Image (spheres, rainbow, N blue to C red):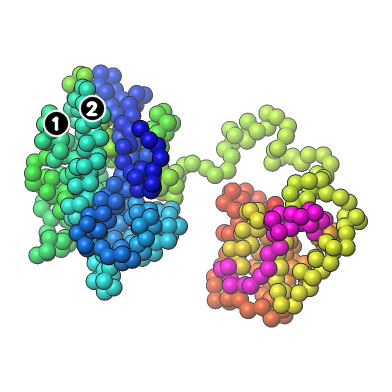
């Protein structure tokens, strides 16, 4: 089989079914279908491609037309990939309580993210998407009711499952309740071609919308007219919006669902972590929740049964959620003790003797007194240029330099960055020579080094301190530099993330690179 593709979109699907050995019970074969193997690491890549290509075929989506959808994140991320590949602008509406990394991923692809109040739940972001689509003439995907969503799963996911278990059959298929596309698309194929396979749907135990037996109130066009009375906020992002989607309702009405299992959020967290530590499988909260439902099935399944559960995405979508709440950024006591078992590269001691200075590209530096005229002249011109009174001597990918760049960007301070390791300064080691001349002038060997109106401020830490005590504002004003004065900015929040824990431990002190 060829592994060369003409487009990233051709890599969607064909995800593996992997045996769960350590967490699975004896006597039952438990498998997980790892949808994180899709290019944007979630099952929603399938939905995104299916909906967009269906709209193209039917003439509902015109070249260059903006696509819009209400999404908790994964559908939007899948759409962002598809739209980027096909050339469609994308706008998504998303409730503010979904994880921050989802917003960033969307914007990284060039999509626009319109946040809606968390109090208005999934219905709020859906109504906002409908309003924007109608106002601007955009194509609305309608993932919760679009038959192309389910059809994509009938053509791909269901066929993969049938092929993977053709040799011995599949007794139970376990999935979560999201848009209903996976559920309806797969369940109807299993009902027709593998009728012995029981379909099990999981939902949050504190928001048993499906298990309540209460119908969804709808408008004349079929859209939900109100939140379902049994909905409550829950942990499983991507599961169970505050209404029953039309696709889900259709699967229930067709009697394609054999069992509905409520899942405790704490159990979902526990099993997501257990999958990583015991099986080496990285999935999110909804994946842990689906596994919880599958394990409940296994407890009563006849010996020799085969169970497959869907793991819809990757754990990386949940870094800012409580799934990672107990995962520290700084070293634990045990890790500190391990570090102290050898003498080098420790935080509790300083190696004897000052380290030798290095050039920007890592070569050993010449003594400062040997700095040459060309480097000194370059330095003087950069620091003394009245048209660019704010100048930073930096390394291109130094994290502290990027903290300063973010600081200047927030305050809209124009500045010049002399990147000493840049390609432009590599000839004859000019960058390294400028750095030696800089060190000789300031007596400072760290990077970055910042000047305002010819005056040396210091590094990242000193710059932030000058902003906090007000002296930076005075220097900028004296140098006739315009900047924003209306921000309530805490510059220490711009330090690299790995510095933050040590800042808290050491009263805000930090070292530059």
Question: Can residue 371 be seen here?
Answer: yes
Query: What range is drawn magenta here?
Result: 409-436
Q: Which residue is denoted by mark 1 in the rendering?
A: 194
- Image quadrant in which you'd find residue 30: top left
C-alpha gap between disc 1 and disc 2: 10 Å
Secondary structure at badge 1 equals loop
Which label sits on residue 366? none
Q: Are marks 1 and 2 in contact (CB under 8 Å)?
A: yes
- Image quadrant in which you'd find residue 191: top left
Secondary structure at badge 2 equals loop
| Residue at image coords 21%, 22% | 168
Which label sits on residue 165? 2
Query: Residue 329, position in %: x, y?
Result: 54, 44
| Residue at image coords 28%, 73% | 136
Residue 412 on the magenta span: yes
Task: Name the side, left or right, on which 447 lies relative to 47.
Answer: right
Residue 80 on the magenta span: no
Name the quadrant of the N terminus: top left
Task: Name the side, left or right, on which 61 lies relative to 36.
Answer: left
- Check the image and report above or below for 114 versus 447: below
Query: Residue 222, position in %: x, y?
Result: 12, 60
Count of all numbered marks drawn on residues in the image:
2
């Amino acid at each position: 089989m060829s592994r060369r593709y003409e487009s990233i979109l051709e890599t969607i699907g064909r995800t593996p079914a992997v045996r769960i050995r350590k967490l699975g019970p004896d006597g039952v074969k438990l498998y997980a279908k790892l949808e994180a193997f899709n290019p944007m690491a979630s099952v929603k890549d399938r939905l995104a491609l299916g909906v967009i290509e269906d709209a193209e075929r039917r003439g509902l989506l015109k070249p260059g037309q903006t696509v819009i959808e209400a999404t908790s994140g994964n559908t939007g991320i899948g759409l962002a990939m598809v739209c980027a590949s096909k050339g469609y602008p994308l706008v998504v509406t998303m409730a503010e309580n979904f994880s921050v990394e989802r917003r960033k991923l969307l914007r990284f692809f060039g999509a626009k993210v319109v946040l809606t109040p968390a109090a208005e739940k999934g219905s709020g972001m859906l109504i906002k998407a409908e309003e924007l689509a109608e106002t601007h003439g955009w194509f609305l995907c309608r993932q919760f009711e679009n038959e192309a969503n389910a059809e994509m799963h009938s053509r791909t996911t269901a066929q993969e499952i049938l092929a993977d278990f053709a040799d011995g059959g599949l007794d139970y298929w376990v999935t979560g309740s999201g848009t209903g596309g996976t559920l309806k698309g797969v369940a109807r194929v299993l009902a027709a071609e593998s009728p012995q396979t029981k379909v099990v749907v999981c939902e949050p135990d504190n928001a048993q919308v499906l298990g309540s037996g209460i119908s969804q109130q709808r408008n004349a066009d079929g859209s939900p007219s109100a939140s379902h009375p049994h909905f409550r906020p829950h942990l499983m992002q991507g599961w169970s919006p505050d209404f029953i989607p039309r696709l889900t309702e259709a699967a229930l009405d067709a009697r394609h669902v054999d069992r509905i299992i409520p899942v405790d959020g704490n159990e979902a967290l526990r099993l997501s972590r257990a999958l990583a530590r015991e099986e080496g499988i990285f999935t999110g909260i909804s994946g842990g929740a689906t596994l919880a439902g599958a394990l409940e099935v296994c407890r009563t399944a006849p010996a020799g049964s085969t169970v497959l559960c869907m793991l819809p995405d990757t754990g990386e979508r949940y870094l800012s959620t409580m799934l990672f709440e107990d995962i520290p950024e700084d070293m634990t006591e045990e890790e500190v003790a391990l570090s102290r078992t050898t003498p080098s590269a420790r935080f509790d001691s300083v190696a004897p003797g000052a380290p030798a200075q290095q050039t920007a590209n890592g070569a050993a530096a010449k003594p400062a007194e040997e700095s040459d005229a060309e480097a000194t002249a370059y330095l003087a011109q950069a620091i003394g240029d009245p048209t660019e009174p704010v100048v930073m001597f930096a390394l291109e990918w130094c994290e502290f330099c990027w903290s300063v760049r973010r600081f200047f960007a927030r305050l809209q301070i124009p500045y010049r960055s002399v990147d000493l390791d840049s390609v432009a300064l590599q000839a004859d080691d000019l960058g390294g020579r400028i750095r030696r001349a800089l060190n000789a002038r300031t007596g400072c060997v760290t990077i970055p080094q910042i000047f305002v109106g010819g005056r040396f401020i210091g590094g990242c830490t000193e710059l932030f301190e000058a902003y906090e005590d007000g002296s930076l504002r005075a220097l900028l004003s004296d140098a006739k530099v315009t900047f924003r004065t209306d921000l309530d900015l805490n510059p220490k929040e711009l330090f690299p993330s790995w510095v933050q824990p040590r800042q808290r431990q050491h009263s805000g002190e930090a070292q530059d690179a």
